[in-house]
Image (cartoon, rainbow, N blue to C red):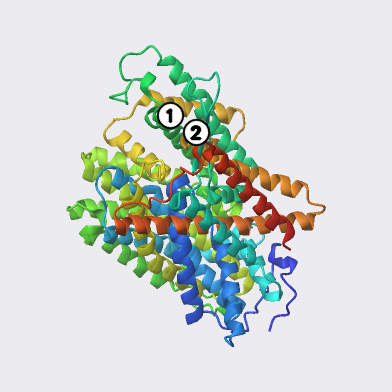
């Protein structure tokens, strides 16, 4: 068996020519791996974090990678079982996190696109949503299989795959000794408690706002949210600062400018049809005007990010095609356990089943009853998915899952699909829904490819069996898809999309893109202002996509993210040495991941209550606080920050 000494430097460095990487668990060993325990644990944690990520994405427009928190919780669960006489190994834990993390990618693709159908009044069924999620997830995993040998094995040390390597470090550290699960579980409790007191009991205000003196309709806002605070810590100070900078531009510059400009107007200004600008509050101006400016900014930022990735895309696609050709010609090779993938025959059959399912099952595209149109859509899906899976798998190897330009890929897919549909005259709501479902499947495929490549990197470092991980990824998609989609349905019933509670920013953007191409119904002046903002931001060498997302999202959403990012900077700067800084970073990320999961799960719980009872919990209201309610909210958020510092600094 392996010596418990942790990872060697070879886990990070390129392998010299003529040598092979020796993983943590040798290829000659055959430890427990794909067991009932690992499957059940992975499915359970996948359902929990998938639902939580769906809530987070609908609220703030982004999701987090859950590989590390799932891995940590799996290790803790296995150690509890070991105390009861059930042995477990590191490769079992790896399979569990592989299965469990797949749900987050499914959630990303679903919440980035499908809520647009609800906004159009074309509510999809649970069966339709689940089929789209399953087909997209399976395509992403299947297309990733022939790329693994090159991207993961041959590019070892050149493509770092940061989340995959970090997850391997966590699993090995837990295998060597020590416990890292405490902060995840504390974070789960704190996140759930925060959501409970703000949205169920309602004894603390969930949103705070204050007018800015001498600035017409200018406001500062803060959401009392543990999840958003945790997301800020995970993202770090740079991205958090850029995002809140975009939000401040909207709320303290653009909204006051619109308010001053519209002060003397006696008629509503398009796209608003009822109220004059004078009669509108800051939130109304943001909803009716600034959101279109933000949409133009996000679309432009996403496309710029995509254009910058074109050289990488072309190279990745070329290398991927070469690798696939080499694999097809290498049928006689005898493979070790650690180099065994699912057969390419399985990949081909699987892709064929997906195409037939997309074209042959009418429920997949809702009201679209033409087999020819469904077949065209299915072919577009496969072409775009194959290209963007190849691209996504390589990009996340360089910059990580968080920086994967999935939104840009989805926008590019929607533009191409909508353009084709426009040529055929399919411009009604059914055509728009069909274009959106194409984007949904491609978004899920690209997202799951990023997650799969990170998981395969973890497995490569540890010495896992690739084909078992690939089966695990498929199991994770197939078992979590229905629960993620059910969570989305319950959240819609409880709050509705496009509301303050669930703005569904990414899906709203996709809706705007499709309508802009097929119906030419956009206020193009506002969209053009957003594009101009991005161009100026690019000239100042500022990353345009996170800034554009800040312009698009409410300020209250970005403020706790900014606080979390700044706290991470402060804690690491005040550490006495590099080891302490690394410890604080790790403990904070685990705590933040736990808070995201806890608040997300409580949000799903509140939605379930509202779904079954016909209304959200009424709580006790804020009558006890009166005018002191805002101070109570500030005090509660300050207490949350203090406790986060205490746990991140004191725990080793």
| Nearer to me, 155 or 12 | 12
Q: Which residue is mark 2?
A: 551
Toward the top, the furthest residue is: 264
In the image, residue 154 above or below residue 489: below
Toward the left, the furthest residue is: 369
User: At which x and y percent is residue 142?
Assistant: 42, 65
Q: Residue at x 69, y 66 (%)?
A: 11
Query: Around disc 2, counting alpha carbons within 10 Å, would you say few (fewer than 14), some (14 to 19), or many (20 or more)?
Result: many
Q: Is residue 223 visible?
A: yes
What is the total number of numbered labels drawn onto the structure image? 2
Image quarter of the C terminus: bottom right
Q: Residue at x 26, y 51 (%)?
A: 376
In the image, residue 330 above or below residue 126: below
Q: Which mark is residue 64?
A: none
Is residue 515 toward the left or the right of residue 343 in the image?
A: left
Q: Which residue is mark 1?
A: 290
Give the quarter of the image for residue 71: bottom right
Query: Around disc 1, counting alpha carbons within 10 Å, would you say few (fewer than 14), some (14 to 19), or many (20 or more)?
Result: many
Callouts 1 and 2 close, C-beta under 8 Å: yes
């Amino acid at each position: 068996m392996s010596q418990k000494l942790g990872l060697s430097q070879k886990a990070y460095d390129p392998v010299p020519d003529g040598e092979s990487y020796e993983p943590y668990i040798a290829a000659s060993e055959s430890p427990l791996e794909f067991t009932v325990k690992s499957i059940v644990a992975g499915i359970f944690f996948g359902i929990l974090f998938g639902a939580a990520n769906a809530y987070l994405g609908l609220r703030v427009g982004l999701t987090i990678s859950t590989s590390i928190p799932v891995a940590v919780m799996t290790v803790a669960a296995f150690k509890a079982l070991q105390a009861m006489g059930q042995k477990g190994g590191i490769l079992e834990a790896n399979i569990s996190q592989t299965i469990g993390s797949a749900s987050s990618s499914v959630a990303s693709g679903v919440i980035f696109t499908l809520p647009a159908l609800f906004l159009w009044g074309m509510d999809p069924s649970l069966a339709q949503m689940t089929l789209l999620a399953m087909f997209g997830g399976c395509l992403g995993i299947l297309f990733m299989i022939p790329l693994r040998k090159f991207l993961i094995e041959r590019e070892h040390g050149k493509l770092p795959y940061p989340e995959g390597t970090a997850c391997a470090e966590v699993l090995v550290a837990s295998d060597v000794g020590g416990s890292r699960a405490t902060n995840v579980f504390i974070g789960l409790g704190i996140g759930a408690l925060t959501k409970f007191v703000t949205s169920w009991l309602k004894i603390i205000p969930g949103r705070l706002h204050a007018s800015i003196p001498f600035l017409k309709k200018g406001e500062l806002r803060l959401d009392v949210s543990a999840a958003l605070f945790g997301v800020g810590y995970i993202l770090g100070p740079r991205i958090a600062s850029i995002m809140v900078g975009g939000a401040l531009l909207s709320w303290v510059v653009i909204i006051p400018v619109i308010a001053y400009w519209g002060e003397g107007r006696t008629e509503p200004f398009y796209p608003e049809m009822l109220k004059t600008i004078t009669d509108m509050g800051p939130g109304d101006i943001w909803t009716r005007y600034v959101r279109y400016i933000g949409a133009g900014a996000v679309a432009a930022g996403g496309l710029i990010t995509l254009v910058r990735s074109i050289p990488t895309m072309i190279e990745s696609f070329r290398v991927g095609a070469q690798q696939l050709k080499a694999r097809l010609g290498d049928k006689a090779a005898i493979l070790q356990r650690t180099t065994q993938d699912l057969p390419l025959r399985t990949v081909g059959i699987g892709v064929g089943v997906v195409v037939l399912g997309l074209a042959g099952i009418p429920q997949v595209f809702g009201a679209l009853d033409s087999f020819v149109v469904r077949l065209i859509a299915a072919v577009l899906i496969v072409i775009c998915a194959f290209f963007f899976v190849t691209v996504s798998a390589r990009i996340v190897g360089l910059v990580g899952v968080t920086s994967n330009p999935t939104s840009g890929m989805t926008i590019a897919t929607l533009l191409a699909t909508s353009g084709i549909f426009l040529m055929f005259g399919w411009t009604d709501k059914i055509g728009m829904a069909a274009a959106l479902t194409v984007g949904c499947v491609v978004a899920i495929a690209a997202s799951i490819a990023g997650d799969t490549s990170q998981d395969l990197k973890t497995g490569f470092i540890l010495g896992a069996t690739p084909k078992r991980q690939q089966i695990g990824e498929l199991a994770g998609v197939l078992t979590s898809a229905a629960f993620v989609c059910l969570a989305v349905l319950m959240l819609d019933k409880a709050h509705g999309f496009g509301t303050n509670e669930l703005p569904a920013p990414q899906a709203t953007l996709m809706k705007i893109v499709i309508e802009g191409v097929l119906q030419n119904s956009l206020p193009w002046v506002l969209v053009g202002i957003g594009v101009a903002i991005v161009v100026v931001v690019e000239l100042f060498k500022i990353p345009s996509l996170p800034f554009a997302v800040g312009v698009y999202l409410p300020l209250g959403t970005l403020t706790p993210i900014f606080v979390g990012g700044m706290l991470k900077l402060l804690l690491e700067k005040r550490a006495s040495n590099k080891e302490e800084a690394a410890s604080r970073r790790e403990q904070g990320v685990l705590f933040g991941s736990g808070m995201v999961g806890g608040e997300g799960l409580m949000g799903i719980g509140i939605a379930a209550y509202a779904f079954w009872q016909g209304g959200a919990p009424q709580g006790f209201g804020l009558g006890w606080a009166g005018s002191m309610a805002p101070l109570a909210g500030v005090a509660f958020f300050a207490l949350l920050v203090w406790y986060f510092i205490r746990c991140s600094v004191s725990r080793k």
